[in-house]
Image (cartoon, helix red, strand yellow):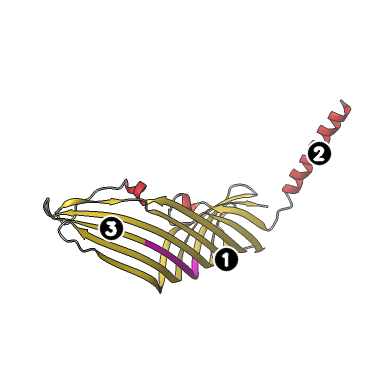
């Protein structure tokens, strides 16, 4: 019994000491997450690490990853359609697709207090992104001119696209101090990115008909690359929930 009481007393003293330290000792590191992807689909879910350099100056690292996959046949339920006002239909068979995206942002921002709870901040992020998209299309089309004249088209296509993006994103945000260790924030930014694309294409189309014994086949295969510079205004680039360590 004495041992139990001693254990409870030690736990109480430990908790009291931790609480006392918690009221004084606060780390310069904040750990959190950017939850804007739950509201805006184009945003990536990210983990966020922030370091308080000096009182109003912060460095921030964001790392995000997203991936998805599916099958076009399932998504579209192999929907039939009309072709150029002729009787016929188009059917999609097994056509899987997948995509993945990795993003890293390293930034600096400066805060200005409005009151004890609210503050605003502004700064700049360096942005690096890598996206990979793969799609496969298996399409069958039937065109019926009459009962004796029917054309058939079968298309098989594979697209493999990689995109590398890098640039800058000036940002502006608002923070609210919920408690000494908890903080929420809202942010918008304008990004200017250079995008490099590399795409592998493999496409085959086969045409047959009931009134022509010949088979026509067209194959396109190769790689193409291009680049472009884009700028985008994002009204919700950040919806942050962070914890001060």
- Residue nearest the observer in this picture, 98 or 55: 98
Most distant residue in the right direction: 2
Dots 3, 2 in contact, CB < 8 A = no
| Discs 1/3, front | 3
Q: What residue range appears in magenta?
A: 158-170
Mark 1 / mark 3, whichever is N-terminal: 1
- Residue annotated with mark 2: 13
Residue at 48% x, 53% y is: 36
**Is residue 154 depicted above or below 38 in this figure?**
below
Q: Is residue 169 above or below residue 150?
A: below
Q: Position of residue 207 (x, y in %)?
A: 24, 61
**For the N terminus, which image quadrant?**
top right
Q: Nearer the viewer, mark 2 or mark 1?
A: 1
Q: Residue at x 62, y 59 (%)?
A: 50
Q: Position of residue 44 (x, y in %)?
A: 49, 56
Marker disc for residue 142: none
Residue 54 shows in this picture: no
Q: Residue at x 35, y 57 (%)?
A: 137
Binning the other alpha carbons within 10 Å of mark 3 as few (below 14), some (14 to 19) or many (20 upward) gives some
Q: Tell me if I can see residue 200 in this picture.
A: yes
Quadrant position of residue 99:
bottom left
Alpha carbons under labels 2 and 1: distance apart:
41 Å
Disc 1 vs disc 3: Cβ atoms closer than 8 Å?
A: no
Crowd class of label 2 (few under 14; some 14 to 19; many from 20; radius 10 Å): few
On screen, residue 45 versus residue 224, left or right, reads right
- Whole-number angstrom distance, CA of label 3 to CA of label 2: 76 Å
Tell me if 15 is positioned left or right of 205 in this view: right
Residue wearing tag 3: 154
Residue 106 is labelled as 1
Is residue 169 in the magenta section?
Answer: yes
The residue drawn where x is 41% and y is 65% is 232
Q: Main secondary structure of the magenta part?
A: strand
């Amino acid at each position: 019994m004495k041992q139990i009481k001693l254990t409870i007393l030690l736990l109480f003293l430990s908790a009291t000491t931790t609480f006392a330290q918690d009221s004084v000792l606060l780390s310069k590191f904040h750990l959190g997450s950017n939850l804007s992807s739950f509201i805006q689909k184009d945003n990536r879910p990210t983990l966020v690490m922030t370091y308080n350099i000096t009182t109003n100056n912060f460095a921030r690292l964001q790392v995000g990853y997203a991936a998805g996959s599916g099958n076009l046949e399932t998504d579209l339920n192999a929907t039939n359609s009309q072709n150029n006002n002729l009787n016929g239909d188009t059917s999609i068979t097994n056509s899987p697709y997948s995509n993945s995206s990795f993003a890293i942002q390293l930034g600096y921002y400066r805060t200005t207090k409005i009151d004890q709870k609210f503050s605003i901040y502004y700064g700049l992020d360096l942005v690096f992104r890598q996206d990979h998209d793969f799609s496969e299309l298996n399409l069958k089309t039937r065109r019926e001119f009459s009962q004796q004249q029917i054309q058939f088209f079968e298309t098989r296509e594979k697209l493999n696209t990689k995109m590398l993006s890098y640039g800058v994103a000036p940002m502006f945000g608002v923070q609210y101090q919920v408690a000494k260790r908890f903080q929420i924030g809202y942010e918008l930014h304008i990004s200017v990115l250079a995008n490099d694309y590399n795409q592998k294409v493999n496409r085959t189309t086969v045409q047959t008909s009931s009134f022509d014994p010949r088979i026509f086949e067209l194959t396109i295969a190769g790689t193409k690359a291009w680049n472009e510079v884009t700028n985008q205004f994002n009204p919700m680039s950040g919806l942050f929930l962070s914890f001060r360590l």
